[in-house]
Amino acid sequence: MQFSDQLITELKPVWQANHNHPFVKELAAGTLPVSKFKFYMVQDYLYLIDYAKLFALGAAKANDLAVEAKFAELLSETLNTEMALHRQYAQQFDISEAELTNAEPTPTTLSYTNYMLSVAQSGGLDKVLVALLPCMWSYNQIGKQLVGTPGANHPLYANWVEMYSDDDYTALTDWTIGLLNQVAAGKNEFEIKELTNIFLNTTRYEYLFWTMAYDHQTWPTIK
Ligand SMILES: Cc1ncc(CO)c(N)n1
């Protein structure tokens, strides 16, 4: 069994809970309150600023020129395309560029991005990959799961479903999964356990990210 199959078999309850989070279910039904999606969008913009750095770390840690080049492409794609789209998309929700730029990360956003960056900075390519993969892979699966639902025809949410279910995003996700399987092939039991645990944690953070947006969770107001 490939390592990627092993991961989602072993971590099935958490992996599935993420796909069935109330935020995702209501997004699919087209009933998700726009205020929750707006909260999500602003935090996701901040998230992407740091997430892109994972690709830079992937390039820095690659020991193969083709892999290094692909990470450079992913980095540029995220910074120059996905984030530009995000800014345009935000306008449809009356979120200005200043609002995006001046927003403060919530405890969940800050904790998630810091965890990913610390794992990726201190580890090799294997750790960079398990830190960044739940994000891409779960979004691609959720995007595909939402094709054909009312959410995919919703005037505001259709764009989101389209972005994460499209063939380009699927191809990038499949490339990353393939690379992880290649890198994991020579690992011993201890290393596999360590990689599985990082994948579990970033999957849990994905779940928490939906909850944060769904419940508008932010810092306590202290006067
Ligand atoms: C929180 C989160 N996870 C995954 C993705 C996919 O890029 C995203 N944009 N945001």
Image (spheres, helix red, strand yellow):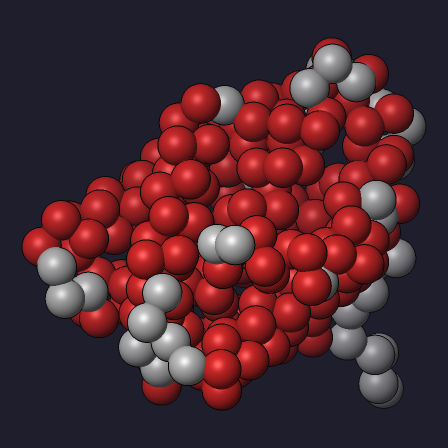
Residue ranking furthest to the front = 1
Percent coordinates x, y for residue 180 in the rendering: 39, 58
Q: Nearer the viewer, residue 146 or 106?
A: 146
Query: Which is more toward the observer, 130 or 35?
Result: 130
Q: Is residue 84 left or right of residue 35?
A: left
Q: Nearer the viewer, residue 50 or 134?
A: 134
Residue 219 point in image, percent of width and height: 77, 75
- Identify the residue shown where x is 59% and y is 59%: 6
In the depicted structure, whether residue 153 falls above or below residue 8:
above
Q: Position of residue 192 (x, y in %)?
A: 49, 76
Nearest the viewer among 2 and 222 is 2
| Screen quadrant of the C terminus | bottom right
Q: Quadrant of residue 174?
A: top left
- The residue drawn where x is 60% and y is 42% is 139
- On screen, 72 above or below 146? below
- Residue at (60%, 77%) from the top-left corner? 197
Residue 92 visible, this angle: no
Task: Please indicate, yes or no, whether residue 195 appears anywhere in the rendered image.
Answer: yes
Question: Which residue corresponds to the image point at 57% horizontal and 52% vertical from the top-left?
Answer: 5
Q: Position of residue 61 (x, y in %)?
A: 22, 70
Residue at the outermost left position: 65
> In the rendered view, would you say 41 is above or below 195?
above
